[in-house]
Amino acid sequence: MELLSSNKSFGGWHQRYKHHSAVLNCEMVFAVYLPPQVEQGQRLPVLYWLSGLTCTDENFMQKAGAQRWAAELGLILVAPDTSPRGPGVPSDPEGAWDFGLGAGFYLNATQQPWAKHYQMHDYVVHELPALIEAKVPVTDQRGISGHSMGGHGALVCALRNPGRYQSVSAFSPISHPSDCPWGEKAFSRYLGEDRACWNDWDASLLLAKASERLPILVDQGEQDGFMQDQLKPEVLEAAAKAIDYPLTLRLQPGYDHSYYFVASFIEEHLRYHAQALQQQQP
Amino acid sequence: MELLSSNKSFGGWHQRYKHHSAVLNCEMVFAVYLPPQVEQGQRLPVLYWLSGLTCTDENFMQKAGAQRWAAELGLILVAPDTSPRGPGVPSDPEGAWDFGLGAGFYLNATQQPWAKHYQMHDYVVHELPALIEAKVPVTDQRGISGHSMGGHGALVCALRNPGRYQSVSAFSPISHPSDCPWGEKAFSRYLGEDRACWNDWDASLLLAKASERLPILVDQGEQDGFMQDQLKPEVLEAAAKAIDYPLTLRLQPGYDHSYYFVASFIEEHLRYHAQALQQQQP
């Protein structure tokens, strides 16, 4: 992997790397935050952050203010891109922002021309962690979180892979993508028109049949203009209630869908992850 | 003034407003952060933040993570734009990013065609505070800070206007603009070729003849690629030493010129301002 840039941040380092992804068949860029404890020789747990529609690795690192708390808590942060990129990677034929580039939906596409590159689930869950674990001093304790499409991604990655993550949370996740405009558009193209195939990528449906009981923390702004039509946290909540799943859904009065909302609660999420990840360390 | 947007942030509100500026002869946008104490009916001191080259009101509010501390400390933040904008406002003939739009240098231009609009000093020191003081529950305690070109602006505004600010700080300021490429380009156009007229807009030269002794806090990243040729903190430091001026210049090892640097130390700056502004409240 090739180091693109390095910025000192809260006593640690924010770095961007480029590497070839065999899973995605393209060059990918990701960002990592290494807290100051890394220079002191410590191995630290890692939190993967999945961003929302239109984002790259940069939005979270620039806008969430997470480094302040990662430095204090001793958490490594990794922020991948939101889709495959580059020459030959197809995107939305109409150039829309809610499908294709910047909108990989953290799934494994089965339909062409998407399937050749759009395998973001396997990239985020397997290929990128293998690279991180080979090159960065992380422990085997992994958390995952994200915002909007990335909140969906975090929940789905955790629910599909019991035992792989020791903590999970989400901000404003697309909670029931098989029944909302963003999700239906993406799933029908990436996965095809057979809706039965969509169930394995829908957090509310995955949760209903979950074998694990990894606690989930979700924050959702009550003034989020996407909540009613696209995010549908009430479907996730109903699924959890039905099987007594440990979901904490917090509706935050006045907050919207922006990174001003994420920044306001990132400290609490990072403390939540750090507590779960560090209590399991040797 | 017209409200453009409002985002809840750390229990308070980040808002953007548009208004007509008589001083700048154009429509201007600025951002304000109102901490939660405002909704509880309190009047609070205000910190003006001046951004650097190419910025608008948005960079600081999105990237510095200042709201977290402003909410805790009870500071109102105001972030103006970095130049006049809009139809009829001239910019750099070659489209460069270091002069004209986004690069007003917080001075009052005397040369045409710039003088008609480029009066950022009077806008930042007089017109905008008058508007803020009429519409926002601020006390009469004002602090000022900024980054790079905005660090220059903060120092110059404070040094030119004794008694107007009760606290001042800067990140990576252009400390001696009359003798660096960015400053010479801007000053020769905005102020004309007579270098004697430049002295009144140069923090190091203003400090040398300061009548007031308002303490100045400056943070400067040691790995800042602009330090040697453009920022020249050593000139400001020498001017302060010569007259025993209370300047605290901190060279921060490893840090660069980015907002990752600003974010890393914004808490300390806000605590510095809050202490100075609040100890003078009735």
Image: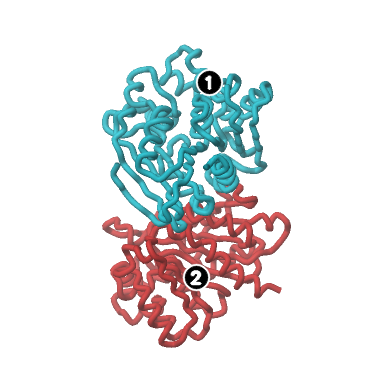
Chain colours: A red, B cyan
Task: Pinpoint residue A247: horizontal percent, then vertical percent.
Answer: 47, 78
Label 1: how many Cα within 10 Å (few below 14, some 14–19, many 20+)? many
Which residue: 50% across, 24% down?
Answer: B160
Secondary structure of the residue carrying numbered label 2: strand
A190 or B278: nearer the viewer = B278
Task: Pinpoint residue A166: horizontal percent, then vertical percent.
Answer: 58, 74
Residue A132 image label? none
Q: Which residue lies furthest to the front in this view?
A: B282
Which residue: 47% across, 37% down?
Answer: B50
Q: Is residue B278 visible?
A: yes
Quadrant showing the N terminus of chain A = bottom right
Direction from residue A51 to residue A222 in the image, left or right: left
Q: Is residue A27 visible?
A: no
Task: Pinpoint residue A82: horizontal percent, then vertical percent.
Answer: 43, 61
Kindly identify the amino acid type of the residue bearing the numbered disc 2: Ser
Q: Mark 2 points at which residue?
A: A169
Residue B178 image label? 1
Q: Would you place residue B10 above or below residue B206 in this image?
A: below
Which residue: 58% across, 23% down?
Answer: B207
Q: Which residue lies furthest to the bottom in this view?
A: A243
